[in-house]
Amino acid sequence: MDTSNSHEIMANETTPLVPTKSSKKPKTPLPKLQIGILMSLLLAEPIASTSIFPYINQLIRELGITGGDDAAVGYYAGIIESLFFVAQALTVLRWSRLSDRIGRRPVLVIGLSGACISILCFGLSTTFWSLVISRCLCGFLNGNAGVMKTMMGELTDSTNMAQAFALFPIVWCIGSFIGPLMGGTLARPQDRWPALFANAFWEKFPYFLPCAVAACMFVLILFMMSIFLEETLPTKRRPKSTSAMLGISSDELLPQQSVAYTPLRSLLTPSVVIPLANYTLLALLDISFIVLLPLLFSTPTHLGGLGFDPATIGSWMALFGVTNGIFQGLFFARIVDWIGPKRLFCVSVSCYAPLMAMFPIMSWIVRARGEVDHAITFALIFLIGIQVAWDMGYAAIFMVITASAPTSNVLGAINGLGQTSASAARVVGPALATSLFAASKEYNLLGGNAVFVVLIVLGGGLRWLASQLRDEVQDKDE
């Protein structure tokens, strides 16, 4: 490093995550093929987790678990929705640490294969316990989320990080569009297309078709990955092919000496823990919203819901996803360049209170008018706008977490810790939200709105926690 650069770094021990105009460096081009394949892998998780949302409540009723009590459906739906994250929380850190030793690709192959097998098992389930086993299998074998963020960190630098991490919510939204649309449209095909699906198989397994289509998509993605995706772990890279694919010098791709094992306790510093805590609470509140939305949609109007059928639920949730993806694709990177990731994150989490307030407002509209009409349509469109702003918090906090790694060799461990804590939050979230929803309706707590009051209070806690993030973080390149 030359003298002028040394003086510059000594004078600025920490630099903004997004460089200021006076110190802005030219952007490094993104390795488009590698990131494109990585983003296709990301589609697997939202499809696997959201495709069941439009019909899970109806499936619980048809299994006869609740004994005909519609108010109790939320309890069992919450259990099913939480199981994936229970299993993932127990194993995701181990998968992330394993990827630091054997490489990123093998772990991704296992995770994608597990998602494919488990979604097929879910579609063939006819009892409550078979649903439980299939969701647990998916979570145990799926360590992809943390590994993909690690790979993204290894493929980018501070000049193009915002552009790359903006793709995470975009692709997640695409998956959130495909999943509910596929689940709601293809569920019970014998009712929608009796001429094509008259076989007794579809009467016995009425929810297998959306699961089979998802599994076929996973197989296609797995095939693409096995051909095109290059390893990013330095000790496992193939210099010639990788330098051509990634567009970086071969010197950077030479196998590096193995680094010493880093105890997890040594990573628990405020600069790491505070971003992880924000991510955890963000995941808790977001999954609570995600599971409450179809529950509100499917709950009968006399209990304060909207009484939508699975196809309508899938269509609305798909609209939520595609709107979110388009907006973030067009504006996220520009907003980060303008106000920075911390300020954007603070603005995003501030939207949670109005997001939750829309639920009782819509229930009140239905009770006041006695039916679901155009007023609910306008309310749902407004809800979409708030949710778009809320969801930008994910990419912003991913950037902060990536930049919080003190050295590159612990990036996998930090992402594993983040995904473990987020998965634990997603365990608590569905069970907490759906149980509170059911209890609020059953016992008329705060007029049936106690669940929304509790979540709004937690949203205020997240807003305070966001203010504790550093205004400036260390540039990982330096």
Image (tube, rainbow, N blue to C red):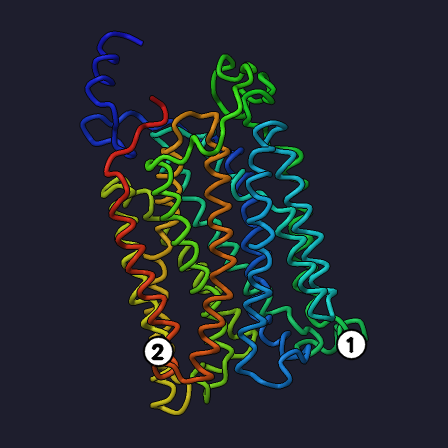
Q: In this view, does 236 lie above or below 469?
A: above
The residue sitting at 29% across, 67% down in the picture is 354
Q: Which of 307 and 259 is in front in this view?
A: 259
Q: Report the Cα–Cα distance between label 2 and label 1.
A: 41 Å
99 lies left or right of 331: right
Residue 120 occupies which quadrant of the picture?
bottom right
Q: Residue lying at the far front in this picture: please name it.
A: 265
**Quick one: SS at disc 1?**
loop
Q: How many marks?
A: 2
Callouts 2 and 1 close, C-beta under 8 Å: no
The residue carrying mark 1 is 198
Give the camera-side residue of 97 and 400: 97
Mark 2 element type? helix
261 on left or right of 458? right
Task: Estimate the x, y position of residue 467 in percent, counting from the top left.
Answer: 24, 48
Which residue does the image show at 30% across and 49% down from the upper left?
Answer: 345
Disc marking residue 43: none
Q: Which of marks 2 and 1 is nearer the N terminus?
A: 1
Q: In this figure, which residue is indicated by the disc labeled 2?
A: 360
Residue 329 in view here: no
Residue 141 x, y percent position in the rendering: 65, 46
Q: In this view, does 461 lie to the left or right of 226?
A: left
> Closer to the camera, 467 or 47?
467
Q: In this view, does 225 lie above or below 288?
A: above
Quarter that holds the N terminus: top left
Q: Which amino acid type corresponds to the residue marked 2 in the rendered image?
A: Pro
Q: Is 270 in front, or is 139?
A: 270
Q: Which residue is drawn at 46% across and 86% down?
A: 303
- Examine the rendering and report whether any part of residue 21 can be seen: yes
